[in-house]
Each structure stands twice: as C-alpha cells, then as structure tokens.
Amino acid sequence: MSGSRSSALGVIALIIGATGLGLALFNIFTSIINTDIAPVTQARAYVDSSYLISAGSWQTINFNLETFDSGNNFDLSIDRYTAPIAGYYVINSRVSYNNPQDGESFLLAIRINSIQVSTAMVHASNTHSISVSVSEIRWLDANDNIDSRTYHYGGGDRMIYGGSLNTFISISLL
C-alpha cells in the first residue's frame, strides 16, 4: 500500500514540477519578447508651400507640415528631428527647385548634430525643375538631432517646390 501511495505522490510532484517549469519558461519567454521589441519611431515632414531661397549659402529647409510623427520627435519650429533612443536610423531627404538656369548646381545635405554627414549634388541643364535626394543609414545616440540643408550656386533666388512629394525629410528607426 505504501508503494502505491508513494507512486501517487511522485506523479503529483511531477505534475506540479512540470507546471512550475512551464510557467517559468512562459515568464522567461514573455520577458524576452517584451524587452527585445524596439519602440516604433518614425517621422516625415514636408514643405507645404513653395518659397524662395537665396544663392550662395547653406540654408535649413523650412518644413512646415508632418505626414506622420509616431513619437512626436520632429520639431517643426526648428526643422529638426530628435532621436528618442539609440539605434540605426534610415534618413531620406529631397528638395525640388523650380526654374533652374542651365549650369546651376544644387546641393542637399543631411546633418547630424550640426555636422554634415551626407551630401548630393545635381547640375541643371535645359529643365524647368530639378530635384536632389539624399539617403543615409546612420547610428544615432538618444537625443541626436537630424536636419536637412540645401545650397545652390546661381544667379539669384530660386523657388523651392512645396508639396509632400517634392521637398521632404523622413526618418525611421530600423
């Protein structure tokens, strides 16, 4: 009789132990999942209305509307995105100009913490509009700032095209 009682107690202990192990594994698994998922942080801002920009100096692009900003990290008052967490970010920017003159050069730069990290340049030739685009993947620390600036060599002020498809910046944590 004592043999069957000890067998029954062994089975009960095995069930309790397996249940406890299952709960422990479930808790470990859910804590890994919950801590390894990075928060979504992404923003896209653009120039709504066309405006004039002068030749011969770098100028920050004046973004005035957002397509989206999941973490409220793009500050339209200073045309700058602030990274909320450290990580790799993809950064895209584009500027479009109206009525460039033949031979004029147009540049676009992405800056991180006021340091130019990527630049593109195009030259106008027999066209009524011209666009410059820059894409970059960069490691950003929390609180690093991103902005986009443009420069053109030419004989006077040029019009930057407004509109969501023409002049914009987008930033997303990878």
Image (tube, rainbow, N blue to C red):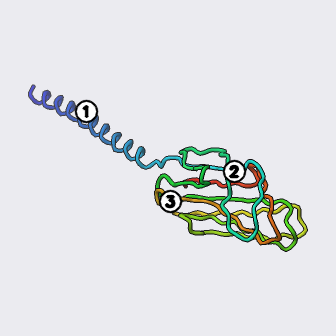
Q: Nearer the viewer, residue 62 or 54?
A: 54
Identify residue type, mark 1: Ile
Considering the numbered disc 2 on the image, is that residue within a helix, a strand or a loop?
strand
Q: Is residue 167 above or below residue 28?
A: below
Q: Position of residue 121 (x, y in %)?
A: 74, 70
Residue 130 tag number: none
Going 46% across and 48% down the picture, which residue do you hit? Answer: 37
Q: Is residue 123 left or right of residue 138?
A: right
Mark 1 crowd level (few <14, some 14–19, many ≥20, 10 Å Cα)? few
Badge 2 is on which residue? 46
Residue 15 tag number: 1
Badge 3 is on which residue? 144
Q: Earlier in the sequence, mark 2 or mark 3?
A: 2
Report the quarter where the N terminus lies.
Answer: top left
Judged from this view, the residue extending furthest toward the left is 2
Considering the numbered disc 3 on the image, is that residue within a helix, a strand or a loop?
loop
Report the quarter where the C terminus lies.
Answer: bottom right
Q: How far is the residue under mark 2 from the one under mark 1?
A: 61 Å
Identify residue type, mark 2: Tyr
Judged from this view, the residue extending furthest toward the right is 126
Q: How far is the residue under mark 3 from the one under mark 1?
A: 53 Å
Q: Position of residue 39 (x, y in %)?
A: 49, 47
Q: Is residue 85 left or right of residue 99?
A: left
The number of numbered discs placed on residues in the rendered structure image is 3
